[in-house]
Image (cartoon, rainbow, N blue to C red):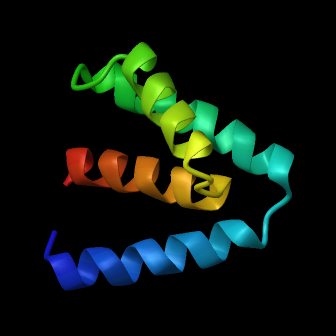
Amino acid sequence: MENRLRTRFFKYLVAHYERMPENKIIQLIEAAKERIANTGYFSEEVLDSVINEMKEEKVGISNILAHLDLLDIEDRT
């Protein structure tokens, strides 16, 4: 995906997820982790580690989900 398009899509995803309740975002993160792990590129352990590091860096859960979705989208396209 082109970098400019990727950035624009990321911003859209973050804005969309910020309107959702936190528990729904957590469910979507779990589903995204499972989809990505099933591709074989990253294990759930690696994804959990990265997510925990992002949380320690005070990255919001909407941003975390948007990052996971971009990984998932790029795998499918």
Q: Residue at x 78, y 73 (%)?
A: 19
Q: Position of residue 31 (x, y in %)?
A: 58, 33
Q: Residue at x 51, y 80 (%)?
A: 12
Q: Residue at x 37, y 84 (%)?
A: 8
Residue 12 drawn above or below residue 69: below
Q: Position of residue 47 (x, y in %)?
A: 43, 28
Is 76 on the left or on the right of 68, as rendered?
left
Residue 7: quarter of image: bottom left
Residue 29: quarter of image: top right
Q: Position of residue 37 (x, y in %)?
A: 37, 22
Q: Residue at x 86, y 58 (%)?
A: 21
Residue 17 drawn above or below residue 38: below
Furthest residue to the front?
57
Is 58 on the left or on the right of 43, as rendered?
right
Number of marks: 0
Q: Quadrant of the N terminus?
A: bottom left
Residue 13 drawn above or below residue 60: below
Residue 6: quarter of image: bottom left
